[in-house]
Amino acid sequence: MRDIHVKDIIAAVKQAAITANYVIGPDLLAAFQRGLTEEESPSGREIFRQLIENARIADTECVPLCQDCGLTVIFAEVGQEVHIVGGDFEAALQEGVRQGYQEGYLRKSVCHPLSRTNTGDNTPAVIHTEIVPGDRLKLWVVPKGGGSENMSRLFMLKPAQGWEGIKEAVVTTVREAGPNACPPYIVGVGIGGNFERAALLAKKSLLRELGSTNPDPDLAAREEDLLKAINDLGIGPQGLGGRLTALGVHLLMQPCHIASLPVAVNIQCHSSRHREVEL
């Protein structure tokens, strides 16, 4: 067994929460640069120029990339040979988020669902924990904005609807989102599992490097099919028209019940933020 102290987990989550909100990933910045040259619309190209400038300012002046610093989602892969010492694992993750949002001067976006009273420290984060082989702890800290989350959808399709039904659900979701979730988007799609698993697959798919090829050749081809259909909508950057409504579509899939075809679409706005740490 390998011991990992909760103080190291708190420090790692705290720093990841701050960095994710200040520094854009190199894959996303590269996509913005491609958009600057590939977008046909003049207003769309101007949007990409502003996104690149926004990323530069956020990085150099240590300010958030977006005013919505998000509800924090944490994906944790815990090696079965890891022993957490010094305290409670989930409490350590929440404390890391709490310290990161306070010390990073990040907007606290979490509130009571009915009274709308802000919790004051951006907790509780939403945590998904998976036990895996090995003696390492991997964490993905994901600040997820409310606008893109609001435009996401879950569908329980009939099995006979097949790929055409899935494609219609995905494209319709993006069409209905229009400019409301700050395009250009990265579209996460989860297929299979059950009601809750499809949603988790859709969100987890967004962790993959933007611009990378799906390791499953069949899913890779379907991602291209969906991306073309979405970009044919003509919504464009910030909804001002253009070719690049989405920068990528990511699919994750797993088997499901013979009577079901669950499909979830998790829209991610252009301010796609996440940080991976390994202890």
Image (tube, grey):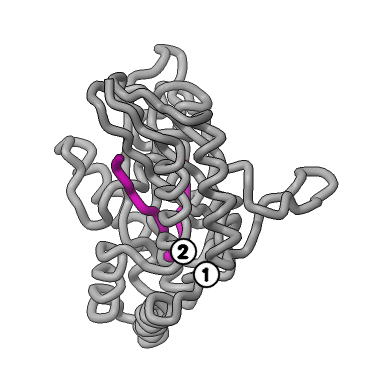
- Expressed as whole percent of the image width and height from the top left, the position of residue 83 reads 36, 23
| Residue projecting furthest to the right | 115
Pointer 2 with pointer 1, Cβ within 8 A: yes
Residue 215 appears in the picture as rendered: yes
Q: Is residue 251 left or right of residue 43?
A: left
Which residue is label 2 attached to? 21
- Expressed as whole percent of the image width and height from the top left, the position of residue 165 reads 42, 35
For the point 42% across and 60% down, the residue is 20
In the structure shown, which secondary structural element does the residue marked by tag 2 occupy?
helix
Q: Is residue 109 left or right of residue 153?
A: right
| Residue projecting furthest to the top | 258
- Disc 2 marks a residue whose amino acid type is Asn
Q: Residues within 10 Å of mark 2 (few under 14, many from 20)?
A: many
Which residue is label 1 attached to? 66
- Disc 1 marks a residue whose amino acid type is Cys
Q: Which residues are magenta?
A: 265-279
Q: Residues within 10 Å of mark 1 (few under 14, many from 20)?
A: some
Query: Vertical placement of 213 versus 232: above or below?
Result: above
- Expressed as whole percent of the image width and height from the top left, the position of residue 160 reads 40, 23
